[in-house]
Amino acid sequence: MRDKQNTTGSDLGYFTPEDYVYTKQLMIGDDQKGNDFFVKFDGVFGITTVQINNQVVGHHNYGYGSFFI
């Protein structure tokens, strides 16, 4: 939640600094099972950990850079 009283000020958009979780559900059809997949991320900020089915599959430590897992 944004709060103009936050010590982060406008640098972080007045958001409270904390860990945030973004969730996306991907549906893979039976005809795609056994294939390799890449997931592209654009504009992820900060230190990022990517999990698939609760298993860590990668990290990215640079803000706002595109990357693939």
Image (spheres, rainbow, N blue to C red):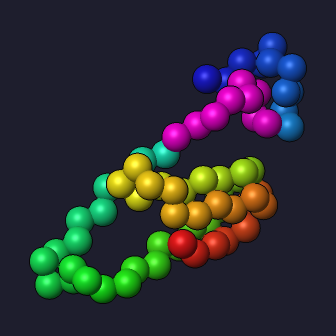
Nearest the viewer among 34 and 23 is 34
* The N terminus, quarter of image: top right
User: Which residue is drawn at the image coordinates 30% and 86% (left, top)?
Assistant: 35
Residue 61 against residue 21 in the figure, above or below: below
Across and down, in percent, residue 46 comes to 74, 50
Q: Residue at the spot x=16%, y=75% of the render?
A: 29
- Left or right: residue 66 compared with residue 11: left
Determine which quarter of the picture holds residue 19: top right
**Percent position of residue 4, x then y:** 78, 18
Residue lying at the far front in this picture: please name it. 55
- Quarter of the figure with residue 63: bottom right
Residue at the extreme left: 30
Tell me if 44 is positioned left or right of 5 in this view: left
Say if the magenta span includes residue 19.
yes
Q: Residue at x 46, y 78 (%)?
A: 38
Give percent across and percent down for residue 47: 72, 51
Q: Position of residue 25 (x, y in %)?
A: 31, 55
Numbered disc total:
0
Start and end of the magenta stretch? 12-21
In-image side of 10 versus 54 (left or right): right
- Is 38 placed above or below 59 here? below
Asked if the magenta segment contains residue 55, the reply would be: no
Horizontal side, residue 1 vs residue 56: left or right: right
Magenta stretch: dominant SS? loop
In percent of the image, x 54 and y 72: which residue is there? 69
